[in-house]
Amino acid sequence: MNYTETTSRSWLSRLSSSFGGILLGIVLILAGTVLLWWNEGDFVKTRDALNEAQGLAVELADVQRVDAASNGKLVHATGPTDTQNVLKDPVFGIGGKGIAFERTVEFYQWIEHSRSEKRQTLGGDEETVTTYSYSTDWVGHRVDSQQFHAPQARMRHVNTVLLDVDNQTQHAANVRFGAYRLPSFLIRAISGEQPFTVRLDPTIRERLTRDVLRAKPELVPFHIRNVDRVPLEKLPVVLHAQGGTLYIGLSPAAPQVGDVRVRFTMTPPAVVSIIAQMKGDTFEQFRAANGKKVSALAMGEVSMDNMFADEHSDNAFMTWLFRLLGTLLIVMGLRCVLAPLAVIASLIPMLGNLVGAGTGFVSLLLGVAWSLIIVSIAWLRFRPAIGGIMLAVAVGLVVLLYIKAKMFKAAAAAQGLTWKKR
């Protein structure tokens, strides 16, 4: 079923909101600027810390005995992990020995979808038509159907769950690395999870079955009045183990709203390679001269040089990610600051669209230019040669912005608009 909702805003209301958004725009610009500056400094600090660590790291050839002579040194080592810790799910009672045990939950729910279209009228008023539609699918969270926009959907598409359970991850507290103990920050870095076959204890299966049927009585046949007084074999089967997945519902092939799907994975012991500072029979993060901490773990046998190369690659990737994020914040901030211009011009819809497109383009160019200037100044502070090149590119963007502004004025003049000089 589809449900359409129409809302309208007057020109004065839109104008008031746009001026109110200027403050948000300033905050976004400042946040993006600070993020860009911090990011460039952090990139250099991390790179220098990695270079310092690589120059000091030594090989720990044998992890089967504690090497007292290497105590306090930054080491690279490869060896097997092992643990005697038993990780057990508190709800389902399954588990075993492993590095990590994870429960991932999905719910079959009604979901609301929306699609909006905006129309402007002569005089600057804006009308928004939003169409809501509904479908069922597996999602990783419970959906509150009482928040649906359509009144009929709130009555017809009521979401329930047969078993209210959340995601959970457990990690072993004690993991051996040959003769050494791994600290928690290295334990949590171990990957390689595998599906864990579900085998429920009969007592737990019975308890869960009765809990599910009490939560949704419509699954119980009419002749059964009390699920607590009926033998388990006479109750509907609502727990289906399929390898590493436990399906909670009548039929995995025909899911119904409220059904739950729980996946279990176990991370077994494996061979790992680490870079960390030795401290007795365990390890800690290496603190470089600039205060940056360095440590790493890789699955399998990985050489020291390759591990440091991967750390440098990760540092570069995160730096570019934060550069894009900082630039996006600045562009969004400029859009907020310039928004009143488009609203004022929207008294004539065609003019409002033209000004809106122009301010969007100006925000993009100016935002990228401002971001480059901040990054360039940061690099002038940390690495002058590269900073100079980036500053030249930023200046070029500013010049391009000036040229585009002249062209925008010419286009507006061609449509009969006049620009007054003060």
Image (cartoon, helix red, strand yellow):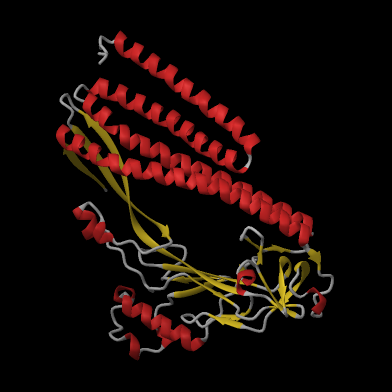
**Residue sitting at 29 percent across and 33 percent down?**
339
Q: Give the quarter of the image for residue 225.
A: bottom left
Q: Give the quarter of the image for residue 80.
A: bottom right
**Residue 310's x, y, as percent?**
70, 53
**Residue sitting at 63 percent across and 40 percent down?**
383
Q: Nearer the viewer, residue 208 or 339?
A: 339
Asked if residue 74 shows in the view, the reply is yes
- Tally the numbered discs: 0
**Residue 335's x, y, as percent?**
35, 35
Q: Quadrant of the C terminus?
A: top left
Q: Nearer the viewer, residue 46 or 169?
A: 46
Q: Nearer the viewer, residue 97 or 153?
A: 97
235 versus 136 height, above or below: below
**Residue 132's x, y, as percent?**
28, 46
Q: In the current view of this chain or complex, which residue is farthest to the right?
A: 61
286 versus 19 height, above or below: below
Asked if residue 67 shows in the view, the reply is no
**Residue sitting at 29 percent across and 62 percent down?**
144
Looking at the image, residue 402 sits to the left or right of residue 52; the answer is left
**Residue 218's x, y, as percent?**
30, 73
Looking at the image, residue 47 sits to the left or right of residue 265; the answer is right
Looking at the image, residue 62 sits to the left or right of residue 255; the answer is right
Q: Give the quarter of the image for residue 142.
A: bottom left
**Residue sitting at 52 percent across and 49 percent down?**
38
Looking at the image, residue 265 sits to the left or right of residue 275; the answer is left
239 versus 348 height, above or below: below
